[in-house]
């Protein structure tokens, strides 16, 4: 079986080259080519034909295929449906901001977390993405769109911390100075609250931004919305966020989808403010985006305004997330795995 060379760091490529009797210094050249999105070893023009043939015999290079590309007529947001090598498909979104372009990538095909308002969980988990497949989402979104990617958010399909080892490897690959060199402070990772993995991530002190999909500050409401809360609880999650902040110095962000009649009462706002103060978190309010299969509705403007006012009164910092790509279902909670036949 051939090995996935794009999922290897330069030092790992160097080790493989040594086993092949090749000089280790070629590893940086190979890694740089891979980080440019080459699809074959033949494109690595500064390597000898003999080395290219040897690499071809031992490794393969991943490359996704665009099944569908949708561009929002409202704000220019681009949503890609990528076909992977095994026929599965995931979605990726490129968004434009004043500070540059951000890509929202998926980390799994499907999701096992079962959040009841999210399209990504429909159909459950199929498999994890490899480090190379996640890197490809960044690389080929940049190449196809012609837009330089300066920021990454791991907020697409899947739970990043449920694919922990591959996600950490991806972060090291995309951050590497010989590759795309995207700084950790320009990367945000979103989790539904796998507390044991949050502590593990904190120990690495990567300096990325941790975004916690909270969506309710009490156990009863959160367990109804998010099965991941069961067996953990909000108090334990907030404690993990506090430990993350103390270890890394990076403030955690609470993502909070405003759902009409479910989590948008004054009582919910007061408790949310308290939870945020406990760990120094910033609150990012998200007007719920519609999902066809779900019956939930977004909070009214008046409820949202009242909710923000209560947060302010209780000393909690909050912002309202800008809604991008709504006309192509590219907004938060709307991404989903799709069959590769779609769009053909």
Image (cartoon, rainbow, N blue to C red):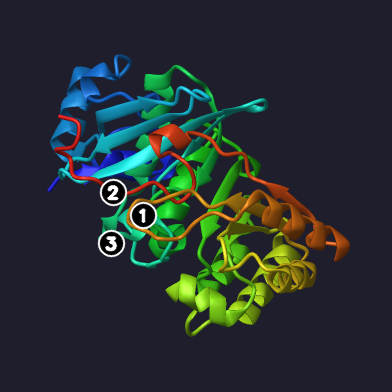
Residue that numbered label 2 is attached to: 337
Label 1: few (<14), some or many (≥20) within 10 Å?
Answer: many
What residue lies at 36% left-to-right and 54% top-to-bottom?
120
Q: Secondary structure at mark 1?
A: helix
In the orientation shown, which residue stands out farthest toward the top? 45
Label 2: few (<14), some or many (≥20) within 10 Å?
Answer: many
Q: Is residue 27 above or below residue 73?
A: below
Q: Is residue 20 above or below residue 299?
A: above
User: Which mark sits nearer the N-terminus, 1 or 2?
Assistant: 1
User: Which mark sits nearer the N-terminus, 3 or 1?
Assistant: 1
Separation of marks 3 and 1 at Cα, in angstroms: 9 Å
Left or right of residue 314, residue 37 in this image: left
The percent position of residue 29, horizontal first and vertical second, equals 40, 26
Q: Using the rendered image of the protein, determine whether residue 273 is visible from the camera's viewpoint.
A: yes
What residue lies at 40% left-to-right and 39% top-to-bottom?
329
The percent position of residue 34, horizontal first and vertical second, equals 35, 29
Q: Which mark is residue 125?
A: 3
Separation of marks 2 and 3 at Cα, in angstroms: 9 Å
Q: Is residue 137 above or below residue 166?
A: above
Label 3: few (<14), some or many (≥20) within 10 Å?
Answer: some
Q: Secondary structure at mark 2?
A: loop
The percent position of residue 319, horizontal first and vertical second, equals 72, 48
User: Which mark sits nearer the N-terminus, 2 or 3?
Assistant: 3
Picture quadrant where residue 279 is located: bottom right
What residue lies at 22% left-to-right and 26% top-to-bottom?
51
Separation of marks 1 and 2 at Cα, in angstroms: 7 Å
Residue that numbered label 1 is attached to: 120
Query: Are the residues at dot 1 and dot 2 in contact (C-beta closer than 8 Å)?
Result: yes
């Amino acid at each position: 079986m051939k090995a996935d060379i794009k999922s290897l760091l330069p030092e790992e490529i160097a080790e493989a080259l040594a086993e092949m009797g090749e000089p280790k210094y070629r590893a940086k050249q190979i890694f740089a080519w891979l980080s440019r999105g080459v699809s074959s070893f033949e494109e690595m023009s500064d390597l000898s034909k003999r080395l290219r043939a040897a690499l071809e015999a031992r490794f393969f290079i991943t490359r996704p295929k665009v099944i569908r590309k949708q561009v929002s007529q409202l704000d220019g947001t681009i949503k890609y449906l990528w076909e992977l090598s095994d026929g599965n498909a995931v979605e990726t979104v490129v968004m434009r901001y004043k500070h540059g372009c951000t890509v929202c990538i998926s980390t799994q095909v499907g999701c096992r977390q079962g959040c009841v308002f999210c399209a990504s969980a429909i159909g459950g988990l199929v498999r994890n993405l490899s480090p190379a497949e996640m890197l490809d989402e960044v690389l080929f979104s940049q190449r196809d769109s012609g837009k330089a990617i300066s920021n990454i958010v791991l907020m697409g399909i899947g739970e990043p911390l449920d694919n922990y080892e591959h996600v950490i490897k991806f972060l090291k690959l995309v951050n590497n100075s010989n590759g795309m060199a995207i700084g950790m402070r320009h990367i945000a990772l979103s989790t539904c609250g796998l507390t044991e993995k949050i502590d593990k991530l904190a120990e690495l002190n990567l300096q990325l931004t941790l975004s916690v999909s909270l969506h309710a500050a009490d156990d009863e409401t959160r367990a109804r919305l998010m099965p991941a809360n069961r067996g953990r609880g909000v108090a334990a999650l907030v404690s993990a966020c506090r430990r993350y902040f103390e270890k890394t110095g990076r403030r955690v962000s609470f993502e909070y989808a405003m759902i009409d009649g479910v989590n948008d009462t004054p009582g919910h706002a007061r408790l949310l403010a308290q939870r945020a103060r406990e760990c120094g978190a910033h609150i990012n309010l998200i007007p719920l985006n519609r999902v066809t299969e779900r019956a939930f509705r977004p909070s009214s403007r008046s409820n949202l305004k009242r909710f923000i006012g209560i947060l302010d009164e209780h000393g909690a910092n909050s912002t309202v997330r800008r809604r991008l790509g709504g006309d192509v279902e590219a907004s938060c909670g709307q991404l989903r795995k799709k069959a590769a036949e779609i769009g053909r």
